[in-house]
Amino acid sequence: MAYTNLSFDYIAMFFFFMLLIWYMTGKKVPLKSFRYFFYVILCAFFATLLETVGYLIVRYRDFVPFHYAYYTTSIQLFFIHNFVVMLTYCLMTMAHIDIKRNKALKWVFILSWVVVAIICIPNLFHNRIMTLEDGKYAASGIGYILYAVDAVMIVMCIWVFVKRRTDFKFLKTNIIVFLFLSGVACGIAQVLKFAPMLNFATAILCTVMYLYQNSSNAVSDQVTGQLNRSFFGEYILDKFSADKAFAVIVVNLDDFKFVNQSMGVETGDKLLLEFGRFLEHMNSDTEVFHFDADQFCVVVDMDDKNPLHIAETIKGRFDLPWLEGSKNILMTATSCIIECPNDAKDISSLMEVIDYSMESAKSTKKRNISYAKDMDLEKIHETKQIEKAVKRAVNRKTVQVYYQPIFSSKEGTYNSAEALARINDQQLGFIPPDLFIPIAEKCGVINELGDLILESVCGFIKENNLAGTSIEYIDINVSPLQLMQKDYSKNLLRTLKKYDVKPSQINIEITETAAMTTFPVVNDNLYDLVANGIAVSLDDYGSGYANIGYINKMPFKYIKIDKEIVWEAFENEKASITLEYTICMLAALKMNIIAEGVETEEMRDILTTFGCQYLQGWYFSKAVPGDEFLKML
């Protein structure tokens, strides 16, 4: 029978009308899926409007020409079934499925649109989909083909929700699935003539999807109102799928932290807001993202604009002060232009290039404009891969500790060893320490790495009762960044106590970089360690700028002579004399001297003659795993 209660349809039309107003007047989300979503709303709106008109014609058929009902219903069926197809297309696009490149999916959608059009449009003239008698609709066999199309689309939607649910970055998948299935249930109920609730269900589904897609927290930065870093990835995925060249101009505000520290965070936020507005109004054909605290990204199509011209416009703006009025601030900015797909072929490589190209630009060409293509992008990629490997090893605690023995020429035995970290990554294989240690310092995991090494060494000392062997202590290399931790010495002593290791069994080895630092916290940590019985060594003496002044001021017990100095002494007579007198000087200062890089019997004998008490190098042994080291003892 014909429906008489149209309340749900009226409410649905209200929701769709509001959605259209929001869409047309609100800030557009620059995604293909958001544009497709507009067509979804239009289809649902017209389907609801025409269904309501059709029911009103049936209700007042004594006053309105009867054949008008066929016209409205035919067009309504065209829109409602297109709504299902467009919704499926939109959801697949949100899940980053490239339908245009997938021939099977592409033809499924083309055939679906063609079938809907072929069935619905001719129905305006021959009324084959349904008949209308005594105010009742009766579907014909051809009408069930449309339901078959809907069923195929529903199955595809369910597949997307199940297989690609993690790709819906700006949707709460569980809520959308619930609303989607509710809409299916309402559609079945309407077909079975229980209640006209399908349009109401689609209105709620579309409203929730719109609110999640256009959520300010998900899309916009709260300080500047620009698109945020999280949304940047979604947008760039769209750009790569479009197969058109584009550029990303990365702009970094130089010394922005100084503004926050000297003028306050509120002033800093105002500066970010003003700069963001300048970028947004500078060119209407660009998209602006607040990428990081002091970093913005401007995305521009290469076909339409010259990225260098835009970058120069940005640079020129910094010739003028910001925040004019009570506070005038003169600043500079460093920019880097990344051309895609030449410099980066996907979102992952682009993020790597952004991070490292800007870092390189700030260190070499601060305040200038540079191109990523002029940098060693292969080296950047390699560094990023090593960074990931280091973080994996630290998080999974797969860092290994090897031990290289140190020989006592006086006692004729191994009296100590140096603990050396090793990373053997499943993807990259063995990574040399001289590569991963600086990267660990740069990416902020050196403290965690140092803690892992300390724990491993202390566990090794305790488990193997090294106190009962000739090994007096184990050398542990410590980064300057570790020594800058306020409670480093206290934490180290706490770890020794946890494993019941005596302070004399651990020796801290630092580079001259740490020795030369002017941070009081470094000296406080070193003197606290020495006061608690832990010896301190200076590593690689002679390789840099360390001089006798540092040795006199710092509480060193051991001095390690760099292997390059040792090797040169056996090739150059002047270097040999320099090494001999250096050893004599250090011995006169009551320092314990360790020579690194000992590789031959001749080197062992001559260095012992010079007065080296301790020798370390491949002549005795390379660094080996703990079990091999124990066998050597």
Image (tube, rainbow, N blue to C red):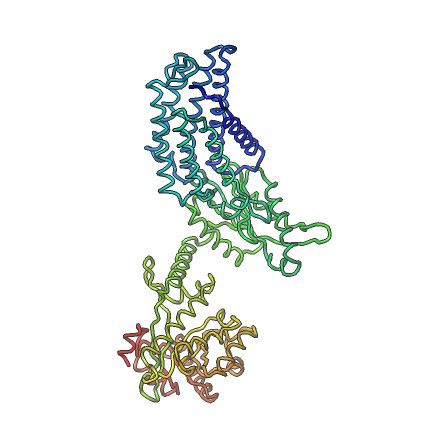
- Residue appearing at x 44%, y 24% in the figure: 79
Residue 168 position (above or below residue 111):
below
- Residue appearing at x 43%, y 70% in the figure: 451
Please state the horizontal and vertical placement of residue 626, each as a whole percent of the image.
31, 74
Please state the horizontal and vertical placement of residue 270, each as a whole percent of the image.
64, 51
Question: Viewer-proximal residue, 442 or 593?
Answer: 442
Please state the horizontal and vertical placement of residue 351, each as a whole percent of the image.
46, 50
Displayed quadrant of residue 401: bottom left
Q: Determine if residue 540 is in view.
A: no
- The quadrant the C terminus occupies is bottom left
Residue 23 position (above or below residue 162):
above
Q: How many marks?
A: 0
Q: Is residue 460 left or right of residue 218?
A: left
Question: Viewer-proximal residue, 296 or 64?
Answer: 64
Please state the horizontal and vertical placement of residue 334, each as a whole percent of the image.
56, 53
Residue 466 position (above or below residue 113):
below
Report the residue that reaches farthest toward the left: 631
Report the residue that reaches farthest toward the right: 326
Question: Viewer-proximal residue, 176 or 611?
Answer: 176
- The quadrant the N terminus occupies is top left
Q: Determine if residue 348 is in view.
A: yes
Displayed quadrant of residue 169: top left
- Residue appearing at x 58%, y 33% in the figure: 25
- Residue appearing at x 51%, y 14% in the figure: 60
